Amino acid sequence: MSMNHSSTNDTKTQNAGRPKGDGIVVLDYGSQYTLLIARRLREIGAYSEVIDGASQRPPEGLVVRGIILSGGPDSVTEAGSRALPDWVLKHNVPVLGVCYGMGLLVEAFGGKMRSATRREYGQAHLKVNDVHNLSRKKFLGEKLFDDTPLDQTVWMSHGDDVAEVPKTFQTAATTDDGVVAAMVHDTLPIAALQYHPEVAHSEFGKELLRNFATKLCQLELNWDGSARIQSLCQYIEDVVGQGHVLVACSGGVDSTVTAALLLKALGPQRVTAVFCDTGLLRQNEVPWVAEKLKVLGLQHLEVLSSSDRFFEALKGVTDPEEKRKIIGKLFIEEFEAYAKKHPAFTHLGQGTLYPDVIESAGHGSGAKVIKSHHNVGGLPDRLALKLCEPFRWLFKDEVRSIGLELGLPLELIERHPFPGPGLAVRILGEVTRERVKMLQQADHVFISSLKEHGLYHVPWQAFAALLPIKSVGVMGDNRTYQQTIALRAVTSSDGMTAGVAELPLSFLTKVADQIVRQVHGINRVVYDITTKPPATIEWE
Ligand code: XMP
């Protein structure tokens, strides 16, 4: 449960630790997938940053070698939709428009978009034109689809499509519905895609982004997040000086690797970890995490026993957003109370990641709030502590590899993600101690069975949720009328989209049997077979 926050302290602090050099800038128009573009680019070794789509200049300090325009909820056919900033086409670097970004380029070059009569959503079949047969020059098209087949599966999510390709462009790929899925400029390194290459379901999306980075932007693929430990330690020493850091730990990857890195940079005497036991954690979580942190060499660990306050505040609350807000607020208050009693701290160490920075920047991208993640809070401002956020320019997988380099156990680094508000968002309806206990037991049966059967890494994330319904069952000769557990196990690469993990039915029935036998009050277990979208991973 990290408490990432990034709106405070000065620009100098925010820019500290920022990598230097060349990269690709992604202009954000509010797509749920914008950050994935940057992440995919970094995965292939191309450094990238995300800025607001309305930015009137490129980011300072980055040598921009290419520009990608993201998707977004707007429609270029409507008045007031966000426009392409002037500098983009004058910057003389390759440009790739994705979805809404394609609409911007179509309009900029005199073509026409239209509101599609049928929204395309999900997977589609892409037919790439054989570029060797294209009638006109094929400067970009050839390179963009290099080393990828002419038939591909791609991920679509759009309301508009191209009605008229601009005269200086030609169609490079279409879908089975005849939608223009890719267009390339005749002579300039400018292209646009209707589909989302950044989404894992686009079969050759990563290859396309690699082609864009290397063959069009001529970027050397030399970015490696895990090779940054020395410079991050230097950043910590510079920021903290002779100070003492308070780090909020949760057992999650981000906060644990932050603590490990702080320990490496500052030594155990100047790092104190605080762990807030909200009562909403997994079974045995507190001693498990405490032990792992000690192995790191941590000497100062404080566990705040805060569960009474959390249960009191959640009494009678059933609305998911209200739960999230109450928990976020209380969490901050608990830390604030602790820090105020210990005035020796000068800095707050946080595992803020690059996506947290971008998402909490609130740069008016218009991305819709699906759930308010409580790990964006006002803590540092209220504590008057300076921030130390070594990972604010990094993605989670980059932090994971740093954790491994630092010698953290794989078991910790590769844990399934756990939501900030904890089990409260996996208990539909009121959160009580009794219901938390029920869920903890059921979840424990599920997760330990996955581990015992060597299936833990089949899903990207797995858990149990407690439903607010009772149903009739029979145990022995008796009628039961009890509650229901839903098991959820999803495949994903980032949590943005998810598929259903295909766990063997024989395994699932065994788990169900064990849950019903062991967890008092449960007489039915169901398996959630919904993808994200349309469902989310968590139930609330
Ligand atoms: P959803 O439910 O939005 O979840 O599909 C996507 C991923 O995010 C996790 N999640 C959270 N993580 N604070 C977090 O740190 C939160 O408030 C939060 N809510 C959801 C979820 O477990 C999944 O991995």
Image (cartoon, helix red, strand yellow):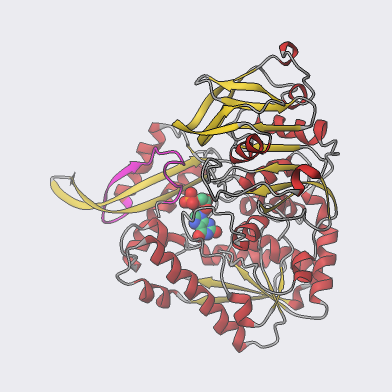
Whether residue 109 is visible to the viewer of this picture, yes or no, is yes
Q: Is residue 181 above or below residue 408?
A: above
**Residue at 31%, 60% in the rendered image:** 429
Q: Quadrant of the C terminus?
A: bottom left
Q: Residue furthest top?
A: 133
Q: Position of residue 517 (x, y in %)?
A: 30, 49
Whether residue 119 is visible to the viewer of this picture, yes or no, is no
Q: Position of residue 334 (x, y in %)?
A: 52, 79
Q: Is residue 328 above or below residue 191?
A: below
Q: Position of residue 116 (x, y in %)?
A: 47, 32
**Residue at 82%, 30% in the rendered image:** 215
Type of secondary structure dominating the magenta stretch: loop
**Residue at 77%, 20% in the rendered image:** 138
Q: Quadrant of the N terminus?
A: bottom right
Q: Is residue 119 above or below residue 407?
A: above
Residue extent of the magenta highlight: 518-538
Residue 255 lies left or right of residue 58; in this view the side is left
The quadrant holding residue 439 is bottom left
Residue nearer the viewer, 431 or 235: 235
Query: For residue 393: magenta?
Result: no
Tell how many labels. Answer: 0
Q: Position of residue 440 (x, y in %)?
A: 40, 58
Residue 460 lies left or right of residue 238; in this view the side is left
Residue nearer the viewer, 388 or 84: 84
